[in-house]
Image: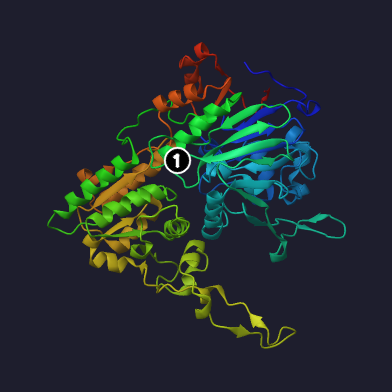
Amino acid sequence: MGQAITSEVNNPQKNHLQFFGGVGVIGGNKICLTASNGKGILLDFGWGFDTSRKYLNNFMDLRGSEVLFDGMTLQELPPPTGYLAGIYREDLYANKDANLLARFPFETGKPKTITEVLICHCHSDHIGNIEKLHPDIVLLCSETNKLVLEHLDETTKSDSFFAGILKYKSFFCQDPDTDEWSCEKGGKEDIIRRKLRAITPNTPVTCAEDGFEIKFMETDHSMPGAGGFLIRDKQSGIKVVYTGDIRRHGPNRDQADRFIQAAKDFAPDVLITEGTRIGRDEEKDEFPSEPAVEAELTRVFKQVALEKSPKLICFECSNKDIWRLRSFYHATISVGRTLVVGAKEYDLLKRCIDAKLLSDIDYSKLRVYLPKKKSGLYAPTDYIQNNDIKNVFKKANSEIPVKTYKTGPKKGLPKPPAVYETIDPTKKFGIKAEEIRENPRQYVIELPYYAMMEFCDILPPPGSYYITSKSAPFDDEQEIDEKKRLNWLTQFQFSKQNRKEIHCSGHISRPDLEQMIKTIHPKKIFPIHTTQSEEFLKMGLDELGIEVILPEHNKSYSI
């Protein structure tokens, strides 16, 4: 078993590995790796779904003013001690009323050891707690992950997991003369932009103040830009491979195989790998690959086209899985229909197409669903709180009226337009419920559970089709949502035979996982992002000279 370290900071010449999330659960990866020079990095800093499942819901979340106190109390956030000293934003523990320091003693200030957080991809269970990190900690990711982060920054709500990653508004104000924090919330002038360093895949770079040489390689997962890291300590020579989330059955299998081969050639001392599916392997009704998903979608859509009465096709999938959306696009155009997606999905697809990550989607043929908000009249003022719609339906600069201040010291100077003046809900790519209701056989529309209220306006014809294209529910709360979803489908007469489950996983299968580990052949392996880590002990890896170490939460290992 791995050797526990009790005085980590006193041993800067050694490499240490410590897990603060992703242990015994799916998601929430938070890993600290220190270099021989005494500096260190974080491998992801994600939100733990297990915390939401155990303690929170849509009406109860960590409190903004007490977010560190609440997060540490629920063991979602590690206390900033040892190598983690100073990792959190100083404005988040400025509220002395929280008694944070009395409950969780630690030294405040800037980061002492951690210099960067390495991002393998942009799902919330890998980046959802980055918003709380100190701005001196640099975000290190690929250009594609930067693209996704910019998409999230511009289209998500202010209270989402993704708000505050690229920039944030100081929660409390700091006096520039005394450096004292006041309990008055920060204003526009207190917006802090994080440092982000975009790196080119397959190109070695250094981090941790030249303590590590790292190489990021894109792999295969249900998110653009997903990849893993090859990390080498420049003094000790210790080598670590971190897979992130990976699979070998998606459209980017070749990238995953190149990563595995590179990891084998790297001859790592340590492999940190996911094991999401190891305890619930071949899930019911899952298809073996993304091409198989597209083929089944196409078959179903052509079957619907043969029916005499008009039928609407609705679906739900992960809104960041651009390859699943591509599969729906291909199946849709094969029967002469038009694909309708949400504003967030449209924005991400357009960015990925413009960046040449996708080459076989014509986004000019996509339509964006425009839901009713506030007045229900599709007025620009209805959407001023909806960042996704504001961004997608934004007017060109030449269309925005130019105004000037009439009085005061700024008289005659340009006046920023009101938010509603920048929104044009009449753009041609937008589509309203009425248009879909009038011609349902023309459209395939993305309508996830949380948007099913739109059925009240769309009124899908009886016997329409609904396709679920995502993982099955894995906790009680999701089971409840699933029951409600079925209630909606029953209410609007989607018959049982017209409800389809067509999906393939974003995670590696057990056979592929075992083969990957044996191919890379590390000296030690730490399984994370799994509820069944003990299954790794049954793979016969010890017979190959590979030591399996089941990581413990907060425990530090000398490597």
Rendered-image quadrant of the C terminus: top right
**Horizontal arrangement in the rendering, residue 241 relative to residue 450 (left or right):** right
Residue 313 percent across, percent down from the top left? 26, 54
Q: Residues within 10 Å of mark 1 (few under 14, many from 20)?
A: many
Q: Residue tagged by mark 1?
A: 221
Residue 492 percent across, percent down from the top left? 26, 54
Residue 127 percent across, percent down from the top left? 58, 44
Q: How many marks?
A: 1
Q: Is residue 71 visible?
A: yes
Residue 511 percent across, percent down from the top left? 39, 24
Kindly state the secondary structure of the residue where label 1 is placed: loop
Question: Which sits in the foreground, 317 or 527?
Answer: 527
Rendered-image quadrant of the N terminus: top right
Scheme of image coloration: rainbow
Outermost residue to the top: 543
Q: Is residue 420 placed above or below 489 in the rendered structure?
A: below
What kind of residue is marked 1? His
Outermost residue to the left: 308
Residue visible at 52% across and 57% down in the picture: 151
Residue visible at 47% across and 35% down in the picture: 258
Q: Is residue 420 placed above or below 317 in the rendered structure?
A: below
Q: Is residue 506 visible?
A: no
Q: Residue 454 is drawn in which quadrant?
A: bottom left
Residue visible at 48% across and 29% down in the picture: 275
Q: Residue 118 is drawn in which quadrant?
A: top right
Question: Which sits in the foreground, 407 or 265?
Answer: 265
